[in-house]
Amino acid sequence: AQSVTQPDIHITVSEGASLELRCNYSYGATPYLFWYVQSPGQGLQLLLKYFSGDTLVQGIKGFEAEFKRSQSSFNLRKPSVHWSDAAEYFCAVGAGNQGGKLIFGQGTELSVKP
Amino acid sequence: GAGVSQSPSNKVTEKGKDVELRCDPISGHTALYWYRQRLGQGLEFLIYFQGNSAPDKSGLPSDRFSAERTGESVSTLTIQRTQQEDSAVYLCASSFYPRETQYFGPGTRLLVL
């Protein structure tokens, strides 16, 4: 069965430091992969997505993610974190042969120290 | 509308009562999804509608849960005989087509006392 694992429940980084959030997936076919961000009181916002092609994907707010098929990973990165990046981050895999429903990871909560 | 809207934004109900949650997708989006987010957890898929096809109900947790969609517009999620474990945020999303980017509504926060 499809699944997504985000190993880090909570991460704290200093403002200006680099960030990497881990995501591993289990899916039999070529996956569609997404990163969403959820800020307090806000809805889910798409950061970036991978469907095919270049394995390094650029998103909004300076985020990027790299699809590594051999490692079944889709880690999210940002070179310099801003205080406004504090939020909950969700990785998801699209079950493409089942109509596009998303399987989400448990989320990683990001705190940013001044 | 500009985005996916959901109503009510908050709902408090007593155990055993029925509730209806509404979702208005983005105009022109053919696919509509319902998810549930329990406190501190990720989103769980509930049900998916695509055009006139039979919905994918594989994520509904029990027969107390049901959903309808009228054409390619409004959807309602109904929970009968609510239980305390049904307390969660219920999120609706829509997309132009399956596998395209899903746009989420703000959710309905349900509390069952």
Image (cartoon, grey):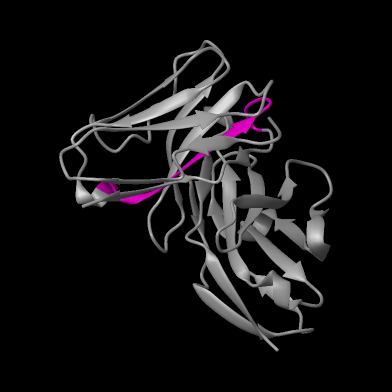
Left or right, A85 with reference to B45? right
Is residue A22 something one can see in this rendering? no
Is the N terminus of chain B in the top left, top right, bottom left or bottom right quadrant?
top right
**Residue B67 drawn in magenta:** no
Left or right, B89 with reference to B100? left
Question: For the magenta stretch, what is the residue range?
Answer: B86-99
Q: Quadrant of residue A95?
A: top right
Please provide percent x and percent y for residue B65: 29, 31
Residue at 83% across / 64% down in the picture? A62
Image height of A114 relative to B96, above or below: below
Q: Quadrant of residue A39?
A: bottom right
Looking at the picture, tell me which residue is in the foreground, A5 or B76: B76
Q: Quadrant of residue B28?
A: top right
Looking at the picture, tell me which residue is in the foreground, B106 or B33: B106
Left or right, A104 with reference to A47? left
Left or right, B68 with reference to A32? left
Residue at 76% across / 77% down in the picture? A81
Please provide percent x and percent y for residue B111: 30, 51
Please provide percent x and percent y for residue B45: 44, 40
Looking at the picture, tell me which residue is in the foreground, A49 or B18: B18
Is residue A46 something one can see in this rendering? yes
Residue at 70% across / 57% down in the picture? A68
